[in-house]
Image (cartoon, coloured by chain):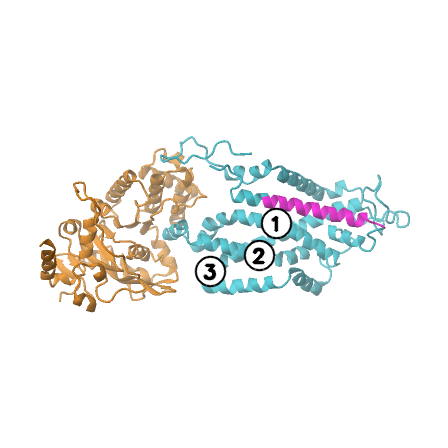
Amino acid sequence: MHRSTPLSYDVAGAPLDAPAPDVWRATPFRALWRDGAARAALCLLAALMLVAVFAPWLAPHGPGAQLDIIGLKNVAPSAAFPFGTDYASRDVLSRMMYGTRVSLSIAILAMLLSTFIGTAYGLVAALGGRFTDAVLMRGVDTFLAIPRILLLLGVVAMWGELSVNALIVVIGLTGWFAAARLVRTLVLALRDRDFVTAARGLGARPSFIAVRHILPHVASPILVAATFGVGAALVIEAGLSFLGFGIPEPQASWGSILRDGNGVTVSAWWLSVVPGAALVITVLAVNVIADRLRDIASGRHLPRS
Amino acid sequence: MTPPSNAGPSASDALIDVQNLRVAFSTPAGLARAVDGVSFTIAPGETVGVVGESGCGKTVTGLSLLRLIEPPGLIDPSSRILFEGRDLLRLSEREIRQVRGRRIAMVFQEPMTALNPVFTVGDQIAEVVRVHDGASRRAAWQRAVEMLERVGLSSPAERARQYPHQLSGGMRQRVLIGMALVMRPALLIADEPTTALDVTVQAQILELLRELQRDFGMAVLLITHDLGVIAETATRVLVMYGGEIVEQASIDELFANAHHPYTQGLLAAMPRVDDTRERLITIPGTVPPPTAWPSGCRFRDRCPYAWDRTAREHPDLFVVSGSHLSRCFLVQEPERRRAVVAEHTE
């Protein structure tokens, strides 16, 4: 659980044979692995990733395959169909596997997009001078004042049905405001640190200072926010698909399977329960990891000295 | 009245010639005139000490030479800083960046915070080389290791791979000096380079600075509040008070014949080995805020000799003798000092 040899800070300097700390091995992933709940969450997500990647080989049927439109309609879970079938006699297990692929990739790629935009935007706002900062942040305030789902529906309504790529862009483009604000706040606090002034005093360009001296210090809070962002994007995608604005039939995502169960919640409960449970468990796992990462980033996993 | 003149080297052979430097910060309490008309020159290879209390403008003076003043601070556009034939205040951003670190470098007060904690010290020195010379990674690293050896770190190749938190304060200050000197600048600005260090380490760092200065032939502007540090290192001293230079003299002249009452107070406040007094002597009062400098002489509230003229008129820098200047009317009316001293000794 705890680091066995705390770093020494003696006046004469650490002994020369002290190994240089390998940042990526020491934190955060090793610390994350030592935590039971986080380890379970990581295993679960790894399994989901495998399912997503190998869906075409793992799934017994295609995502849109209608097996027997008369005989296999809304069949309850059984040995042959562990998650049952839907109104169009499609295998829900297969659809869930392909849906994992769609839901996870949309969530992760949208998160990457919004993290990138938010980080760049926050960095420019914090370092670009008072006027730039004021203009950029009032823009963010404006967008944050509009409920995200409303913003999304507005965008989606202009196109009707969206492809997976378009969904990624739309969710990514509406999810970076909070990240921008976080990065700006962090960078404002870092901007006047002595090592930044020292780097300026030694002739470094502002862009170089931003990327090399400031960005590494905001990496861990960004990582935490981005991890929470995956959970949020999963739910948003499911919400859009449930409302019928998500990916088009016959492609499956967890949200679109949920939608198939709408109206038959009692007679074909598996259509709601299976994707619903998948969503809840996955978002929970992502949030557990994000939560632990936050503890690690603030040094709370280290032994008190 | 004697016109104020610039002691030290004449402007033509000076390395840097600062003329009427004014720096102001706009604050909620009003305009803070942190540096208010400072002029001095430094010759190549010379060490000039700047001494004064916190808030006297000495750090801001140092930062101004590299144009590191950021809003809400502003250097008065009428100021001039001539360095190697160019006015630093008229250079483009790109041009001033090429001066920083390459021709003029700075060592900061806090060795704990002036190094970036997420990079190895070798990386941080190599970075300076890469920024200025576009050297290859390997060549830059090689120069970083050489520099670490030059500033007196044992096993420099191993030290270069360590992070700042693995080094002691003195070693970190050596690394910062290495970062500043790796491009062999003509002028080093050292802002309180030893203040954060233990006394024994202080002496080592000062010795190192002296040695490197001799070997590299660079000029040093040493900013400190510690007259002891100045005495060991500098050849000439500028005493600052209230954003102005109040006295300027060679080191020997200053310690033998300090003229300005403020300098005399600073010298009297220095404890001595042969001291028999029980309490340390202090100068009464504090530095006035830079948003509201007193009219007339800025030291008059704390000065034992102040008289009505010091409230009415602002004193110039008067010549005491040769290159010794003092911003005090006592140069013109020396009998006033004798009268006050006589009164006290009676």
Q: Is residue A291 above or below residue B312?
A: above
The N terminus of chain A lies in which quarter of the figure?
top right
Between the residue at mark 2 and the residue at mark 1, the CA separation in whole angstroms equals 12 Å
Q: Earlier in the sequence, mark 3 or mark 2?
A: 3
SS at mark 2 in the image: helix
Per the image, the residue denoted by label 3 is A128
Looking at the rendered structure, the kind of residue marked 2 is Ala
Res. A100 visible in picture: no
Magenta span contains residue A283: yes
Chain B rendered in what hue?
orange
Prevailing SS of the magenta stretch: helix
Tell me, yes or no, whether the two marked residues, 2 and 1, touch with CB atoms within 8 Å: no
- In magenta, the rendered stretch is A267-291
Query: Residue B242: x and y, percent?
Result: 26, 60
SS at mark 3 in the image: loop
Chain bearing mark 2:
A
Is residue A96 or residue B170 the one in the foreground?
A: B170
Counting labels gives 3
Per the image, the residue denoted by label 2 is A178
Which of the two marks, 3 or 2, is nearer to us in this view? 2
Identify the residue shown where x is 52% and y is 37%.
Answer: A26
Query: Residue B80: x and y, percent?
Result: 28, 63
Q: Residue B145 has which mark?
A: none
Chain bearing mark 3:
A
Chain A rendered in what hue?
cyan
Res. B165 visible in picture: yes
Looking at the rendered structure, the kind of residue marked 1 is Phe
